[in-house]
Image (tube, rainbow, N blue to C red):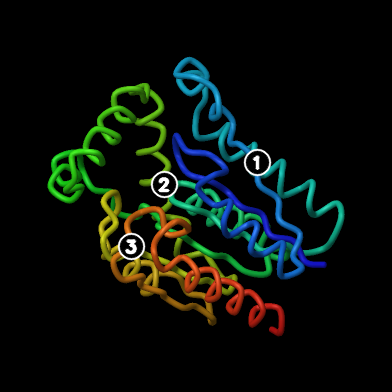
Amino acid sequence: MDSCLFIHGFTGGEHEISPLSQYMEQHHYRSRTFTLAGHGGGRRELRQSDRFGWLQSAEHELNKLLEEQEAVHLIGFSTGALIASRLSVQYRQAVKSLTLLSAPVFPLNPLEIVRTLGSPAMLRNYFSKFGSTPPKATRQFQRLVRESFDIYPQITAPTLIVQGTRDHLVKTKSAGFLERTIPSGQKQVLMVEKSGHMVCHCDDHARVMKEVLHFIRQAETL
């Protein structure tokens, strides 16, 4: 049984990718989800964490899977996609495929986010989350975004890029940039119409999950 390691996003949690992890389990893949260092607690825990700790916690989970078998499929959502990208380069021989969900190559700035959120409920949720995020943690996220530009040209694993056309946190041009920059011989872009940032919870989530499964099955034959 092949394994999939799922990595959630900044200030998020396992719920962001749980529908897909459960779907892969149903299709006979071992799915491992976990909580990044500094996440899952309060503001203090997040403030005391940094990007190195986030990366180390993901690397630890990957190594635990690699103790059981020789190769793993990496699936990262949002900031988790940046972490998965780095691990795919660092563990090049062990990573069978890389799936990038809503990768924040070009994050929107706060003013752009306000223009794209639309509904009052989404605005309230964003400002609540934004106000509770320690500035230090935000700076660590921004550093990770910038440092990832050196990683993309090194990715050789089969790569699936999934981007919602109505993502309120990431510019849609991120997907095109990744397609042009990643040198992998096998890569695919899936643009999800009318989906926001949370592609695993969008109205077309069934299609997203089927496409991820199909891509991973194809990668296994290489």
Instruction: Find residue 119 and report its horizontal and vertical position in percent.
Output: 19, 45
Eye-nearest disc, 2 or 1: 1
At horizontal 57% and vertical 65% (from top left) the residue drawn is 98
Q: Earlier in the sequence, mark 2 or mark 1?
A: 1
Assess whether mark 3 and mark 2 are in contact (beta carbons under 8 angstroms). Answer: no
The relative height of residue 34 versus residue 62 in the rendered view (above or below) is above
Q: Is residue 60 left or right of residue 76?
A: right
- Between 108 and 86, the residue placed more toward the observer is 108
Mark 2, other Cα within 10 Å: few <14 / some 14–19 / many ≥20:
few
State the residue position of label 3: 195
State the residue position of label 1: 34
Quarter containing the N terminus: bottom right
Q: Is residue 139 left or right of residue 46?
A: left
At horizontal 35% and vertical 30% (from top left) the residue drawn is 139
Q: Earlier in the sequence, mark 2 or mark 3?
A: 2
State the residue position of label 2: 147
Disc 2 residue type (three-letter): Glu
Instruction: Find residue 50 and report its horizontal and vertical position in percent.
Output: 50, 28
The span from disc 3 to disc 1 (Cα, nearest Å) is: 25 Å
Q: Is residue 116 left or right of residue 54?
A: left
Quarter containing the C terminus: bottom right
Eye-nearest disc, 3 or 1: 3
The relative height of residue 128 versus residue 147 in the rendered view (above or below) is above
Assess whether mark 1 and mark 2 are in contact (beta carbons under 8 angstroms). Answer: no
At horizontal 76% and vertical 59% (from top left) the residue drawn is 30
Q: Earlier in the sequence, mark 3 or mark 1?
A: 1
Determine the residue located farthest toward the right in the rendered image.
68
Disc 1 residue type (three-letter): Phe
Q: Quadrant of residue 123?
A: top left
Q: Secondary structure at mark 3?
A: loop
Disc 3 residue type (three-letter): Ser
